[in-house]
Image (cartoon, helix red, strand yellow):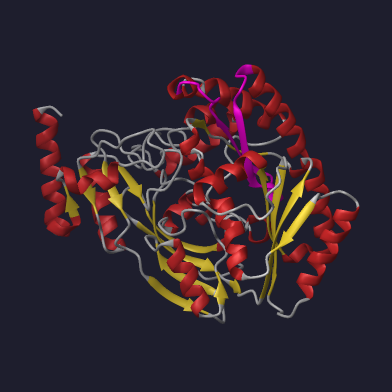
Amino acid sequence: MDATTAIASDDLAARLRQALGDDRVITDSDGLEPFLHEERGLYRGAAKIAVLPRSTEEVATAVRICAEAGVPVVPQGGNTGLVGGAVTGAGEVVISLKRMNRILGVDAIDYTMTVEAGAILETIQNAAEEKDCLFPLSLGAEGSCQIGGNIASNAGGINVLRYGNTRDLVLGLEVVLPDGRIWNGLRALHKDNTGYALKHLFIGSEGTLGIITKAVLKLFALPRERHTALCVLADVDHALALLARLKARASEAITAFELMSGFALDLASAHSGDAKPIADAYPWFVLLELSGSQGGNALRETMEEVLGEALEQELIQDAVIAESLDQAAVFWRLRERIPEAQKPAGASIKHDVAVPVSRIPEFLRAADAAVIAARPGTRLCAFGHLGDGNLHYNLTQPEGMDPQAFLDCWREMNDIVHGIAVRLGGSFSAEHGIGLLKAGELSHYKEPIELELMQRVKAALDPSGTMNPGKVIGTA
């Protein structure tokens, strides 16, 4: 940082402290460090100022001061994103929502909850359960991710098949706009047909159009009956047949339907120390869950009947139904540990793709063949939410290969995997978003008219381009 830039940064920090208080502004290197970290280690933030407001009004004040100075701001939640969406560049200011973490109210009659954006997802889940309700958004980082970031990235997770993405779980929002004004859209309405649904501009916008400060969330009845099973299959086509059979018999009760390759499950078992419930080697596993609010044992009987028929018809090779909550937790722990378990196995190139559910086998066959042809020995670590068409198609380096040499293939592998997904009517980003990591992919794969419309929205709401610049479609 040159002398002129340093003076300008010091002046901005002084103005922010004067308006908000000394404890709201961090400029020392040790204090800044947590806000410069990025989950995958692909980027490092460069901000010299972090602001930690405690109210919407303080967020608005900070944004207004930065806007007047022409200084870009980057909203930051739990910093668990996987595409660099909260990474700061030089001269940018972090606005962290971590101190705005209150549950403002739970209405068990309307089945709604009002929260501040910094509330931890797991805290929200627990607050709902205390009122005999369910907030169904669930993902691996739920113990540290914040709801504002979940909304800004339109997070998915394991329950999308039944409850939808985050977009489907939000009734209302409060947002600080790029000029510091506050839009209050905190309406707890399931029906509001009064013009453009403005909340949907900000859900999934990754902080490029405004900073989400509060939200009204949709709750559901707490399940009284929940049954989890792990099945083994010879091929993915059989997984689709099993899903179809379950939908025909228990469509509304299917909470999750997760696909895992044998290699992925082996990694998770070795890393977590949890033994695989089915020890033999199989190419594919499906983790499925049925739940309902009626209680009793009807869903257990349905699950047993469907799996019994599937076994007789050789759609599955074997299955284990969890006999306790602890055993079900082991099944889910194995699924959730897969991404972390890849790290000891060497360098990995990760993809978050979606294709129509019916085309998942076609995608896997085409991608497997193309990847192996390009880089023989690559270990294929595929897993994800088969029920909604979202796969995490991760590639682990060949054994003995230099990790950096494999990472140097990132662009080549992206071209292969993303190209196949898009050709099959799919998406190169299903639930992780765009951020910095995939901004180039967006411009490559999106139709020109789609890009133009996105750019027009960005220019209309953030004409100065100071709200999380460079992410998604870049500056206005």
Whether residue 439 is situated above or below residue 129 in the rendered picture: above
Which residue is nearer to you in this view: 148 or 460?
148
Residue positioned 77% across, 46% down in the render: 233
Whether residue 293 is situated above or below residue 390 in the rendered picture: below
Which residue is nearer to you in this view: 373 or 292?
373
Taking the image as shown, residue 139 lies to the left or right of residue 19, namely right
Taking the image as shown, residue 88 lies to the left or right of residue 377, namely left
Which residue is nearer to you in this view: 90 or 146?
146
Residue 390 position in % (x across, y down)? 64, 44
Q: Quadrant of the C terminus?
A: top left
What span is colored magenta in the figure? 374-402
Taking the image as shown, residue 406 lies to the left or right of residue 56, namely right
Residue 23 position in % (x across, y down)? 15, 59
Query: What is the number of callouts on the image?
Result: 0
Residue positioned 68% across, 65% down in the render: 322
Q: Quadrant of the N terminus?
A: top left
- Is there any visible trace of residue 447 in the rendered image? no
Residue positioned 49% across, 79% down in the render: 130
Which residue is nearer to you in this view: 67 or 385?
385
Taking the image as shown, residue 458 lies to the left or right of residue 137, namely left
Is residue 65 in the magenta section? no
Quarter assignment of residue 104: bottom left
Whether residue 232 is situated above or below residue 349 in the rendered picture: below
Quarter assignment of residue 310: bottom right
Residue 5 position in % (x across, y down)? 14, 32
Is residue 398 in the magenta section? yes
- Is there any visible trace of residue 36 in the rendered image? yes
Residue positioned 66% across, 55% down in the render: 277
